[in-house]
Image: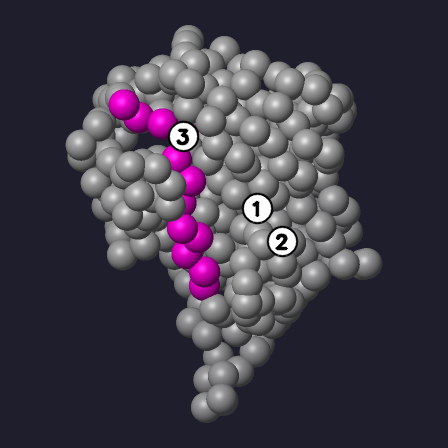
Amino acid sequence: MLYPFTFEPILKKIIWGGSDICPFKGITPVQDGIGESWELSHVEDNYSVVANGELKGKSLDELIREYGAQLMGKSVTERFGTTFPLLIKFIDARDNLSIQVHTDDELAKERHNSFGKTEMWYVVKAAEGAALYSGFSQQIDADEYVERVQNDTIMDVLQQYEVKEGDVFFLPAGRVHAIGSGCFIAEIQQTSNITYRIYDYNRKDANGNGRELHTGLAKDAIDYTLYPDYRTAYTPQVNEKVELVDCSYFTTNLLDITEPVTRDLQSLDSFVVYICMSGKATLKDNKGNVIEVHQGQTVLIPADTASVTLTPGPDARFMETYIK
């Protein structure tokens, strides 16, 4: 019988990494320079490993191959086969990350035999003045993009946002974006490791070399549409589901709870992921399985689960994600 799964975090020590991920997740001893914690991953060579229950030690890949639609959902399995379609991360940036863009499914398949990458960010916390980039601040075309990368003025046409806790950004494939210094973010994305680097602030490594830019590849991947605002607007509510993102790749809701909430999952035909953003809660499913979940933990609910009840401690906040 399948049950709610927690996983061992995959910690990534990166040159721009900060010092907030370990304390946030309650990991000791605290490690500095951890830029990312991959919470739920089916990226090759980075498979998540179950941390609880009788299947402890099994990889996500093994679960999928053994349980298939029982774990993932029939419609999800029909669409994605034996690939878990989402990658869940926490990102802690002590320095500015490079300006990037991701391909859509069609271009990723053609060039890399991969899925594309549509993603979303939820700002867990931000230092004073911390900012990120999403989209363009004025209309440009592909030729102007190439010219601006070459003459070092691409930053002049990117839309910058100062951010605070709770800000949400939806980043469909093709949107130019970057995380800035001082941002601590939860990221939900398609399972893909394809990234085109557009600009890296002319930084040099120890040998005086700049990082490779993918100017030509990115030119065809960028969506040059100009939008008035690239933020995702929502109204927080207590003890109610608040939809943050609803796209073909994932639906994500915010749950701020002060009293027990039961979520009916029967009609979804999908796994459900709960990311505990703050506080803690007891999670009980309809099969009688009970686990304690605390800030920084991610829980995978198998698709054959009919319902879960979250009984909160103080300040309990979750993101809930599934595939329609």
Is there a contact, CB below 8 Å, between mark 2 and mark 1?
A: yes
- Residue 196 placement: quadrant: bottom left
Q: CA distance from mark 2 to mark 3?
A: 22 Å
Q: Residues within 10 Å of mark 2 (few under 14, many from 20)?
A: some
The residue shown at (57%, 52%) is 25
- Report helix, strand or loop for mark 2: helix
Q: Residues within 10 Å of mark 1 (few under 14, many from 20)?
A: many
Pick the front one: 319 or 171: 319
- N-terminal of the two: label 2 or label 3? 3
Query: Residue 296 — which label?
Result: 1
Which span of residues is magenta-colored?
1-12
Q: Quadrant of the C terminus?
A: top left
Pick the front one: 186 or 255: 255
Percent of width and height locating residue 64:
24, 34
- Which residue is the site of mark 3? 4
**Is residue 233 among what the camera can see?**
yes
- N-terminal of the two: label 2 or label 1? 2
- Residue 260 placement: quadrant: top right
- Which residue is the site of mark 2? 24
Q: The residue under label 2 is which amino acid type?
A: Phe
Position of 2 with respect to 312 (left or right) is left
- Residue 256 included in the magenta stretch of the image: no
**Is residue 97 among what the camera can see?**
no
Pick the front one: 211 or 21: 21
Q: The residue under label 1 is which amino acid type?
A: Gly
- Residue 2 included in the magenta stretch of the image: yes
Position of 194 with respect to 19 (left or right) is left
The residue shown at (62%, 23%) is 311
- Report helix, strand or loop for mark 1: loop
